[in-house]
Image (cartoon, rainbow, N blue to C red):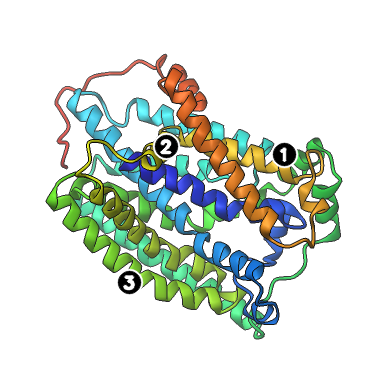
């Protein structure tokens, strides 16, 4: 189930990020806030199937799968802790180096591929969350809820400020002409230089959402230990509750924030979307539960699970492929097909997604790990592990 959820999250993050690659100004266009949410006025003026499909895909993917991926990262952290405890190894021990290696990978990914990388933020959050796993359950619970409350307060203040500054609804401005030229005509090294020169602004998302990431990491730990990913009736009952409450509460709130205008972007992406992500855990889990009577999962679930097993490689590769398809130093489809409607963007997402799923299936037939996962494993294998004088309580 964890692998299927990870694969689903990778495809979902691509459904959100592909619009960044395809937009005028590319990654720099996000700073202007142009076209981030559903433009109700534009949709009513052009109620075509293409406009409706774009609005549905944008609103349906915005923030939800990123939050899902963050939850699963926390669950994976709990699995690593449990494994170390059972083997009597020090904690965080080698995991500290794993987080630092992830930070280095994220730095390279940010510099060379995609300005809105999430790996650097995950690495920093993982270091803190790993230490918290050595504290008491009460301490973790206190940190989790304090971080959640702090995050909601910050997002509320940001939204209030945006609404006050833009009473008309906070509609985003057009990206600067220099940014449009950079991604339509600029060379690869120019884009790398632009990311480095604007690093302080482009790295603001993990800073603003650190409290959310900490909350979701610890929530992922809590869900794993509560049995949300376990087979059997107890796990299925918990997944049903997650689906009902997550989707029942999250979808109406998410619809309201998505339709309220760009001033509500932060509430939409960073408050409503995480609630929906919890519901997605339950929904995907229940879909898998419904096929549990068969000897093995269906071909789609098995294929998506392969992508989940190679999630790090898939995340980086999807952004590399989107960059080569959309930017001027590659095929330049973003500028060539500008104004032609959203169908080519949706097609690019589907094509890249199918390539990732098929590629992961074929790769795992021959290799045990994905390419980047194998590099990480080989490097970390050189770090010695030290045993504890006493075993860590797995359920602490």
Residue beneath the point at 34% across and 72% down = 249
Which quadrant does the N terminus fall into? top left
Q: Is residue 222 visible?
A: no
Q: Is residue 343 visible?
A: yes
Disc number lying in front (2 or 3): 2
- Which residue does the numbered mark 1 point to in the structure image? 324
248 on left or right of 361: left
Residue beneath the point at 28% across and 40% down = 78
Dot 3 falls on a residue whose secondary structure is helix
Q: Which mark is residue 303?
A: 2
Give the camera-side residue of 203 and 22.
22
Give the camera-side residue of 51 and 42.
51
Earlier sequence position, callout 1 versus callout 3: 3
Give the camera-side residue of 25 and 213.
25
Image location of residue 275, percent across then percent down: 37, 64
252 on left or right of 325: left
Q: Is residue 193 above or below residue 149?
A: above
User: Cα distance, mark 2 to mark 1?
Assistant: 25 Å
* Mark 1 residue crowding within 10 angstroms, few (<14) / some (14–19) / many (20+): some
* Mark 2 residue crowding within 10 angstroms, few (<14) / some (14–19) / many (20+): many
Dot 1 falls on a residue whose secondary structure is helix
Image location of residue 95, percent across then percent down: 36, 30
325 on left or right of 66: right
Which quadrant does the C terminus fall into? top left
- Which residue does the numbered mark 3 point to in the structure image? 248
Disc number lying in front (2 or 1): 2
Residue beneath the point at 53% across and 68% down = 266
22 on left or right of 332: left
Q: Is residue 126 above or below residue 240?
A: above
């Amino acid at each position: 189930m964890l692998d299927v959820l990870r694969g689903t999250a990778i495809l979902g993050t691509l459904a959100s990020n592909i619009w960044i690659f395809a937009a005028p100004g590319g990654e720099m266009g996000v700073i202007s806030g142009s076209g981030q949410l559903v433009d109700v006025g534009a949709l009513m003026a052009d109620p075509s199937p293409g406009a409706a499909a774009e609005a549905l895909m944008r609103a349906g993917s915005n923030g939800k799968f990123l939050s899902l991926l963050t939850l699963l990262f926390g669950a994976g952290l709990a699995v690593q802790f449990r494994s170390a405890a059972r083997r009597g190894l020090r904690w965080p021990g080698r995991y500290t180096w794993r987080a630092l290696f992830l930070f280095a990978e994220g730095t390279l990914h940010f510099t060379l591929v995609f300005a809105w990388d999430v790996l650097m933020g995950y690495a920093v959050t993982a270091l803190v969350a790993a230490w918290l796993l050595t504290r008491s359950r009460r301490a973790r619970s206190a940190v989790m809820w304090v971080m959640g409350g702090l995050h909601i307060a910050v997002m509320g203040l940001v939204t209030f400020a945006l609404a006050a500054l833009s009473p008309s609804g906070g509609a985003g401005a057009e990206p600067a002409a220099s940014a449009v030229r950079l991604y339509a005509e600029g060379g690869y090294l120019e884009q790398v230089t632009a990311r480095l020169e604007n690093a302080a602004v482009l790295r603001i998302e993990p800073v603003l959402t650190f409290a959310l990431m900490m909350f979701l990491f610890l929530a992922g730990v809590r869900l794993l230990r509560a049995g949300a990913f376990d087979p059997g009736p107890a796990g299925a009952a918990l997944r049903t509750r997650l689906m009902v409450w997550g989707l029942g509460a999250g979808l109406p709130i998410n619809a309201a924030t998505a339709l309220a205008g760009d001033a509500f972007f932060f509430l939409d992406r960073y408050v409503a979307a995480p609630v929906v992500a919890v519901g997605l855990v339950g929904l995907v889990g229940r879909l898998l539960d419904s096929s549990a009577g068969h000897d093995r999962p269906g071909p789609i679930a098995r294929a998506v699970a392969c992508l989940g097993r190679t999630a790090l490689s898939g995340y980086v590769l999807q952004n590399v492929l989107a960059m080569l398809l959309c930017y001027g130093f590659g095929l330049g489809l973003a500028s060539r097909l500008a104004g032609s409607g959203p169908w080519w963007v949706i097609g690019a997402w589907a094509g890249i997604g199918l390539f990732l799923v098929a590629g992961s299936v074929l790769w795992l037939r021959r290799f045990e790990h994905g390419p980047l996962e194998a590099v990480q494993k080989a490097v970390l294998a050189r770090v010695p592990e030290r045993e504890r004088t006493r075993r860590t309580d797995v359920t602490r």
